[in-house]
Each structure stands twice: as structure tokens, then as C-alpha cells.
Image (cartoon, helix red, strand yellow):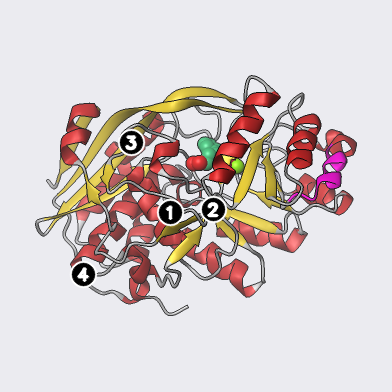
């Protein structure tokens, strides 16, 4: 694909890397097969250069449950390794940045936070929207909602009804052993025709194949990450036993894993999260691979603030994102978001892709300042 971001030969000399940890209470607790949270510790990166500020978000959680990374590990890796690599010499391109990070193994979410901030900066320097910078074509993107495990099935049904009435195009149910077949059956009976999917966040093993096969009765759009987070082989075995399409999330930590999963037929759909794969460079490569092989992709979410969400909206504007993303309205997560205007979902279940420069949203610095728990500024030697 011909991309502005990959041709740019502009030099950007970064003056400083600011890290801010900002706590945002969630309007409702979010429960998955690996635990429940009431607030989100938002990890912001702000790169300053040429009088501009570029914003990114590190999506790591406080506990190493979804992935081994945490806000603490990201802080260490950014402060001691990644920020010095950014500050060392002027940045030439996204590939230049990715190349500087490549020797450091893992820590994809930490790397992605800096790549996001760099791309916001580059878009501003070019006077372009992020979507235009990466070659996005959609003016609106289709969105769905990811519904956590609820105390009762009745509470889940109430939430399904609420988000459908708000226009969301797809409902995703978090499942785990004991909260799976029966609740999917109830939701499907109440709504025979909606786009419905489930996400197990690795709560099963291949030994549960017979149990998981019962999900074939509910005409699901996909079953997301049923098996272990580092597995590609057992998912291929499971996919052969199921009619329903499998989608991988946790297992796809980069282009190589995406290639392996498609070669082995471990899934028929891929969830792309910029943080999980280490940034835009890898997310774009996975998008292009899937587009070339006719594999649908969609943009996953990590309960981001509006800053991370603005990047997700730009990513999902690429042509290959043909399925609704986990990109919900700000008001689905927080009483007050970090950007204005906040992200809204239209009654047809779409989010508008902004065409203003950079993120396309104002960053609410005053509010961020009031919510900041930790601030560290790293500058050039
Ligand atoms: O597995 O997709 C996931 C949230 C945190 C960690 C992992 C996941 C999720 C979600 C929420 O499903 C998606 C969102 O609305 O941001
Ligand atoms: Mg998932």
C-alpha cells in the first residue's frame, strides 16, 4: 500500500518525552474471565517537538492479566530504554522509530505508546489527519460494544437492550466457564438477528472442544480467543472442529504470529490492537497481510481514554477493517473523557472519522493535570 507515513523523510527532533499516569473511574465495573476493574489507570505519552505535542497511550493494565505488561513494566522500559532511543537523534520516519525499538524484546504496549505519540506529531507536522497519514479511506467506522460478565443474566440482557437501542452494530459478550452457553442462548433467543460474538480471553483449553462446539448453535459472528494466550496450534485444531469462525486477539502479538495463524488456519478473523502488536508499523503490516488474503479484521479496544481511542478510530478507517470495532462512545466508559468533543456513536452505530489535523480531537490538558497521579519528564541530554 502506498502510504504517506512510510514515505515521509521529515526529520523531527524530539525535545522531551512526558509520561503521565491519570486515573479515570469507570462508570461501570468491567469484568472478564481474568478479573474485574472499577477504574482505569491511563498511561499517557506526550512527545514535544517543534513547538508541537504528540499524544499516545500505553494500554497496559495495572496487573499482568491480559498480557505480561503492566503500567509498571512499561514505565521502566520507556524510561530506561525506549525514550532514550527516541531522544537520541532526530526521527526520520515510522520505520526509523520501529527499527530503534526492534532490538528490545517484547514490551509491545510500551513501544506502541511512543509510536502513537510520534504519529500524532508527524500528522501535525504534515498538517494532516491521522487517518489520512496512514491511508485511511472510511469517513465513518462501524462500531460494536464489548459487554463484561454481569452479576445476573437479567442485568446482561438489560445492557444488551441499552446498547442496541443506542445503535451499536454488534454485541460482544465476555464468556468464561459457567457464564457461556446458557447466557449466549438467552441473548440469542431475545435477539435472533443481531450480530453477536463472544470473547473468552483464553479461559478454555482444547480439552473443552466438545463444550465450545455447543456455541455453533447460535450463529455467532466469531468466538474470540477461546484458548491460551500464546497458542496458535490448538486454535487450528479447534477451528477444524467448529463451524463458527475463530478470531485471535491475545495470540497475535505481531506480523509473524498473524502469518503463522493464517498459514495454520488457526482463525478466520483477526482483532488488531495497536498496543498488543507494538504500534502502527506492525498494525499496518497485519492489516495489509489480512487484506491481501481476504481475512476480515476489526479494531479491538483496551478501555482506552479518548487519546488511545482517537488512534483506534484512525486505524479502523483503513479499508480492511470490515467488521465493527470495540470502539465505543466515551460515555460508555467514563463520566469525563480526556478529549473534546468526546467520542460519540451515531444512531446508525457509526463513529465519524475526524478530518482535523492530528488526533482530530482537543486534548483536555487542564482535566488531565487534575487527574494526574504521576508525571515524569525525560529530556534530551
Ligand atoms: O479482550 O478485547 C479484549 C478490554 C480490556 C482488555 C481486553 C479486552 C477488552 C475489551 C474491551 O473487550 C473493549 C473496549 O471496549 O475497549
Ligand atoms: Mg479480546
Q: Looking at the image, is 6 positioned above or below residue 183?
A: below
- Picture quadrant where residue 126 is located: bottom left
How crowded is the residue under tag 1: few (<14 C-alpha within 10 Å), some, or many (20+)?
Answer: many
Discs 3, 2 touching: Cβ within 8 Å: no
The secondary element bearing badge 3 is classed as strand
On residue 325, which mark appears? 2
Does the magenta-highlighted stretch encompass residue 314?
no
* Disc nearest the viewer among 3 and 4: 4
* Disc nearest the viewer among 2 and 1: 2
Q: Earlier in the sequence, mark 3 or mark 2?
A: 3
Q: Which residue is mark 4?
A: 127
Q: Earlier in the sequence, mark 3 or mark 1?
A: 3
Q: Position of residue 175 (x, y in %)?
A: 69, 33
* Disc nearest the viewer among 3 and 2: 2
Q: Which residue is mark 3?
A: 43
Cβ of mark 2 under 8 A from ligand 1 = no
- Where on the image, by quarter, is ligand 1? top right
Q: Which residues are magenta?
A: 212-220
Amino acid at each position: 500500500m502506498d502510504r504517506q507515513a512510510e514515505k515521509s523523510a521529515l526529520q523531527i527532533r524530539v525535545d522531551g518525552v512526558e509520561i503521565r499516569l491519570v486515573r479515570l473511574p469507570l462508570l461501570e465495573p468491567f469484568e472478564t474471565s481474568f478479573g474485574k476493574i472499577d477504574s482505569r489507570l491511563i498511561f499517557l505519552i506526550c512527545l514535544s517537538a517543534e513547538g508541537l505535542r504528540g499524544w499516545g497511550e500505553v494500554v497496559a493494565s495495572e496487573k499482568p492479566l491480559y498480557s505480561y505488561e503492566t503500567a509498571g513494566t512499561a514505565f521502566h522500559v520507556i524510561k530506561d530504554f525506549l525514550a532514550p532511543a527516541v531522544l537520541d537523534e532526530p526521527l526520520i520516519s515510522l520505520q526509523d522509530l520501529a527499527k530503534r525499538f526492534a532490538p528490545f524484546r517484547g514490551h509491545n504496549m510500551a513501544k506502541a505508546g511512543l509510536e502513537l505519540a510520534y504519529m500524532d506529531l508527524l500528522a501535525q507536522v504534515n498538517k494532516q489527519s491521522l487517518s489520512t497519514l496512514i491511508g485511511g479511506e472510511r469517513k465513518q467506522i462501524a462500531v460494536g460494544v464489548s459487554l463484561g460478565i454481569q452479576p445476573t443474566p437479567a442485568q446482561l440482557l438489560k445492557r444488551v437492550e441499552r446498547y442496541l437501542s443506542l445503535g451499536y452494530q454488534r454485541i460482544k459478550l465476555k464468556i468464561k466457564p459457567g457464564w457461556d452457553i446458557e447466557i449466549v442462548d438467552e441473548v440469542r433467543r431475545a435477539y435472533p438477528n443481531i450480530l453477536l460474538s463472544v470473547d473468552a480471553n483464553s479461559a478454555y483449553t482444547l480439552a473443552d472442544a466438545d463444550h465450545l462446539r455447543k456455541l455453533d448453535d447460535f450463529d455467532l459472528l466469531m468466538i474470540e480467543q477461546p484458548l491460551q494466550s500464546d497458542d496458535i496450534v490448538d486454535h487450528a485444531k479447534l477451528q477444524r472442529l467448529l463451524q463458527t469462525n475463530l478470531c485471535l486477539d491475545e495470540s497475535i502479538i505481531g506480523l509473524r504470529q498473524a502469518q503463522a495463524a493464517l498459514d495454520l488456519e488457526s482463525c478466520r478473523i483477526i482483532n488488531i490492537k495497536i498496543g498488543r502488536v507494538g504500534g502502527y508499523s506492525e498494525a499496518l503490516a497485519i492489516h495489509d497481510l489480512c487484506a491481501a488474503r481476504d481475512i476480515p479484521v476489526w479494531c479491538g479496544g483496551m478501555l482506552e481514554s479518548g487519546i488511545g481511542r482517537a488512534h483506534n478510530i484512525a486505524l479502523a478507517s483503513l479499508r480492511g477493517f470490515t467488521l465493527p470495532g470495540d470502539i465505543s462512545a466515551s460515555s460508555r466508559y467514563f463520566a469525563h473523557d480526556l478529549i473534546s468533543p468526546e467520542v460519540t456513536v451515531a444512531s446508525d452505530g457509526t463513529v465519524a472519522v475526524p478530518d482535523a489535523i492530528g488526533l482530530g480531537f482537543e486534548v483536555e490538558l487542564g482535566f488531565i493535570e487534575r487527574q494526574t497521579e504521576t508525571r515524569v519528564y525525560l529530556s534530551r541530554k
